[in-house]
Amino acid sequence: MRVLIAILLALSAAPAEREVKVRLETTKGAVVIAVHHDWAPRGAARFLELVEARYFDDSRFFRVVRGQWAQFGINRDPRVASAWRTRTIPDDPRRESNTRGRVAFAFAVPDGRTTQVYISLRDNSYQDEQGFVPFGEVVEGMDVADALDSEYGERAGGGIRAGRQQPLFDGGNAYLDREFPRLDRLLRARVMR
């Protein structure tokens, strides 16, 4: 809790100090995301809250479409994933575009962002008008994001809007490891100090 308070205090400081870096350790290597509070304050705060809660640890990149996006954010434990599923946050106004390397929350309905995040592997600026709001950007390891296993594409989890994620919520990692064993793992996510 003290760490989360320190992060939130840092985010409320001067604009130059409003960036926090998060390191994602994956089975392909490390990805570093610069989280920008001024781009999307609610999205940035939620992402950092999930990192501090270790929500992403030992999860899967369950929706990777080569050259489009790499999505993660359903907890390994069905009880934990279900508990967070209804903890929505209000939308942020868009200040930045969904270009290559940007990181945003996936959502199904307005004001419905919860825990699922994706990295744009290309210029996805066509999503700007749909309400997808970047809160960060990959500053190291874009080659790692590009290399994440994409053989399953939409089959392993589809998008939130596709309505095919219930097995992930019901079965967690046990389901994904059984049905899609070559998905890359997000081993741990930590704020860089």
Image (cartoon, helix red, strand yellow):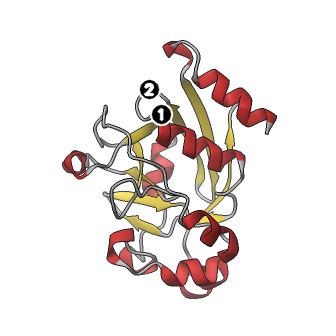
Residue sitting at 72 percent across and 31 percent down? 5
Q: Is residue 153 above or below residue 87?
A: below
Mark 2 in CB contact with mark 1 (< 8 angstroms)? yes
Q: Quadrant of residue 32?
A: top right
- Where does residue 127 sit, x and y in percent of width and height? 24, 51
Measured as percent of width and height from the top left, residue 154 is found at 37, 75
What residue would you read off at disc 1?
41
- Mark 1: give few (<14), some (14-19) or many (20+) Cα within 10 Å: some
Q: Above or below — where is 155 with respect to 10?
A: below
Corner quadrant of residue 46: top right
Q: Nearer the viewer, residue 149 or 23?
A: 23
Residue closest to the far right: 2
Q: Quadrant of the N terminus?
A: top right
Residue 154 against residue 138 in the figure, above or below? below
Image side of residue 63 versus residue 34, left or right: left
Rendering coords of residue 126 (x, y %): 19, 49
Label disc, if present, on residue 101 of the rendered structure: none
Residue nearest the viewer, comparing 146 with 32: 32
| Residue at 32 percent of width and 37 percent of height | 93
Nearer-the-camera pick, 87 or 7: 87
Going by the numbered disc 1, the residue's amino acid type is Pro
Residue density around tag 2, few if under 14, some if 14–19, many if 20 or more, within 10 Å: some
Percent position of residue 2, x then y: 80, 33
Would residue 95 appear left or right of 45 to someone viewing this image? Answer: left
Q: Quadrant of the C terminus?
A: top right
Question: Tag on residue 38?
Answer: 2
Type of residue at label 2? Answer: Asp
Q: CA distance from mark 2 to mark 1?
A: 6 Å
Label 2: which secondary element = loop
Element type at mark 1: helix
Classify 7 as above or below 89: above
